[in-house]
Amino acid sequence: MDKMLELLIQAFNMEYEDIFYYLREASFYKTKIKGAEKIVSTFEEFGRMELRHADILAMKIIALGGKAKLTYKPIESIPNMKDVLKKHIESESKMYRIYAELIEICTDRDFKLVLKGIREDEKDHLEKVTYLYKRTKFR
């Protein structure tokens, strides 16, 4: 498998993992934490964005002759908000690096622009999650 396809599949799987995490956490915080509306709406928005990213990646994987197959990993339960936000900081940082690498090796000019847009979304996610981490008061 070539490097481009390998990275696309890795990114596809990471996007889906983040979809599951963001939407599950948004649902949990909506019912369990008073005043969590900002985090809930942010996580719901990020979940929708990650789904769009995954769809774009799946189409490109298929166009390149690969299979957009989700490698299922059980979603770990993270007991507190501080660790949830740290996990998202790590994940979004890794996604940003993967998209940077994809942009570097991509020879399709149009798809390179798409990848740059997704990378900017990941940068935005990273900045917002980092902001929430710094602004949230943990016990």
Image: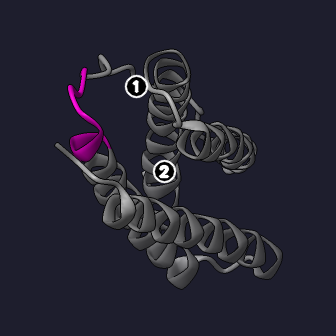
Tell me what residue is drawn at x 44 percent, y 30 percent: 21
Amino acid type shown at disc 2: Ala
Depth check, front residue: 94 or 29: 29
**Location of residue 4 in the rendering, given as x and y in whole percent from the top left corner:** 51, 63
The Cα–Cα distance between marks 1 and 2, rounded to whole angstroms, is 11 Å
Tell me what residue is drawn at x 34 percent, y 59 percent: 133
Residue 98 placement, left or right of 109: left
Tell me what residue is drawn at x 44 percent, y 43 percent: 14
Which tag, 1 or 2, sits closer to the chain's start?
2
Q: Which mark is residue 100?
A: none
* Span of residues in magenta: 77-84
Q: Residue furthest right?
A: 110
- Residue picked out by circle 1: 71
Q: Which mark is residue 11?
A: 2
Depth check, front residue: 96 or 77: 77
Q: Residues within 10 Å of mark 1 (few under 14, many from 20)?
A: few
Q: Residues within 10 Å of mark 2 (few under 14, many from 20)?
A: many
Quadrant of res 92: bottom left
Dot 1: what SS?
Answer: loop
**Location of residue 37 in the rendering, given as x and y in whole percent from the top left corner:** 61, 38
Quadrant of res 71: top left
